[in-house]
Amino acid sequence: MDNFVTIEQIDRAAAFIRARLHITPKIGMILGTGLADIADEVEDADVIPYSEIPEWPLSHVVGHKNRLVVGKLAGQNVAVMQGRIHYYEGYSMSEITMPVRVLQRLGMEIMVVTNAAGAINPDYLPGDVMLIRDTIGLIGMAGNNPLRGPNLDEFGTRFPDMSQMFDRQLMEAARKQAQKLNITLREGVYVGLAGPSFESPADLRFLHFAGADAVGMSTVPETIVARHGGVRVLGFSGVTNKANLDGSTITTHEEVLEAAGVIVPRLKAILLGVLNEL
Ligand code: HPA
């Protein structure tokens, strides 16, 4: 049975966090697998381990630090999630997206979402950063949308529009920064699957045919929930591996973590540039 998070649970977590902060975060950031070091630059930070926050779901994936870092980054008030909760850990869609709701209650107006992803687009290389232009929400399309269950009217309407999941102005700002920094920025469609197994070659050929450029196990539910609440979203995939469309190579979590190390400085530079310009 699905577990639908209530506004009371969201507000309990938000009240606990608010009492520990000395600023109001306007920008939320979710750092994907291996990308948590981007938060090292946050100044004057209040750091709250997820395990202390009431109602907050816990992640146990290697490569996630599992804490909320709230402070100043490139002149902006940010709340950075070092690690996210994945659907494959056994939580409901409503539970894995609860942190997005909490950040909204704390004042989030813009969300930057990042992930580690496999490259379906044959031009992409491990180490590449991809600006997410759109998503294929395969889990939601198959019936498990994060907004299933009672609508939380405090945030948005029952049937929210998703024609512009990623904010055009923020995307343009990211392109400009990448160009200025001389960093290749790919741009494409991210498909979000449930995981935790990586895809079979036939899965990948299907996804390629469907128009996906990168594949991962996150991001789509959080983006849908943020958009439901009217939050502007900017999304990036860090390409950690080539997806294995012909079955000739294997994909491992270690490979994903290793490539993330190359991605961090590139993504960090683009992100700080965008924040500076806001
Ligand atoms: N598939 C799914 N998720 C991923 C991958 C992949 O190849 N790489 C990093 N996350």
Image: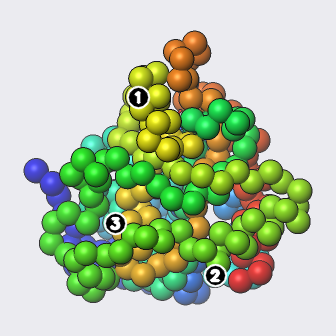
**Mark toward the start of the polypeptide (2 vs 3):** 2
Screen quadrant of the C terminus:
bottom right
The residue where tag 1 is placed is: 203
The residue where tag 2 is placed is: 77
Q: Amino acid at mark 3?
A: Met
Front tag of 1 and 2: 1
Element under label 1? helix
What residue lies at 28% left-to-right and 51% top-to-bottom? Answer: 141
Residue 36 visible from this viewpoint: no
Residue 225: horizontal and vertical position, in percent?
36, 69
In depth, the one of 108 and 36 nearer the eye is 108
The residue where tag 3 is placed is: 98
Image quarter of residue 146: bottom left
In depth, the one of 239 and 1 nearer the eye is 239
Q: CA distance from mark 3 to mark 1?
A: 29 Å
Judge the density around disc 2: few (<14), some (14-19), many (≥20) Cα neighbours within 10 Å.
Answer: many
In depth, the one of 212 and 67 nearer the eye is 212
Q: Quick check: 159 above or below 278?
A: above
**Mark toward the start of the polypeptide (1 vs 2):** 2
